Amino acid sequence: MTFQIHALDYAPFAALFDLSDAALAERGARRVRADADPGYPCRVSLRDAAVGEELILTNYRHLDVASPYAATHAIFVRKGAIRATPRPGALPQVLTRRVLSLRAFDMAGFMAEADITDGAGLRHRLEAMLAGPGVAFVDIHNAKQGCFAARATRAAVG
C-alpha cells in the first residue's frame, strides 16, 4: 500500500505575514524567527526553517469534520513557503527526524486506529494503517508538542 504525504497550501496563510504583531495576536497567532534547526517545521514546505527565517505560528483546523474528533492545533508556516509535493511513498525529512503520533480516520472523521512511531518506523506504520478497511487518511502529529504535521492518504494508482 503506497501512501501520499500532503502539505498544506500557502495561500490561506500568506496574508498573515502582512499583519502587525498586534493584529496577529488578536487572531491568536504570532510571528517568530527560527533560532534552531531543526525546530520549526513548516507545514507548507515540509521542511524545517533555517535559523533566522520568519514564520507564523498559528492555529489550524486540520480535522474539520462533524465528529467528536474534530481538531485544531498549532502549526508553523515559513514566509514565502512553496508547497511541497512529495512523490508517492516519499517521506520528507521533517517527518523522519521526529517521534510521531499517527491517527487513522474513516471518511466520517471517526478514529479507526492510533499509534506512536519514530521516523524509522513511519513508512511501515502508514502502509499498515492505510491498508485497514475503512481508513480514509492518517493525520500525522509531532508526538511531543502535538502539533499537526501532515496528512497521508493512499497514493493514486495509475
Image (cartoon, grey):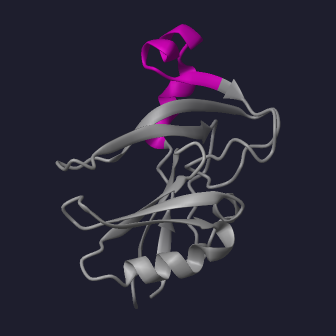
Dividing the picture into quadrants, the one containing residue 93 is bottom right
The image shows residue 151 at horizontal and vertical percentages of 45, 61
Asked if the magenta segment contains residue 158, the reply would be no
> How many discs mark residues in the rendered view?
0
Is 62 or 113 nearer to us in this picture?
Answer: 113
Look at the magenta stretch and give its main secondary structure. helix
The image shows residue 27 at horizontal and vertical percentages of 42, 19
Horizontally, residue 153 falls left or right of residue 110, namely right
Horizontally, residue 121 falls left or right of residue 93, namely left
Asked if the magenta segment contains residue 26, the reply would be yes
- Is there any visible trace of residue 89 in the rendered image? no
Dividing the picture into quadrants, the one containing residue 137 is bottom left
- Please tell me which residue is depicted at 23% across the width and 60% down the height of the picture: 110
Is the residue 121 above or below the residue 82 in the image?
Answer: below
Quadrant of the image containing the C terminus: bottom left
In the rendered image, the residue lying farthest to the bottom is 158
- Please tell me which residue is depicted at 38% across the width and 40% down the height of the picture: 72
The image shows residue 21 at horizontal and vertical percentages of 58, 12
The image shows residue 74 at horizontal and vertical percentages of 50, 36
Residue range in magenta is 11-31
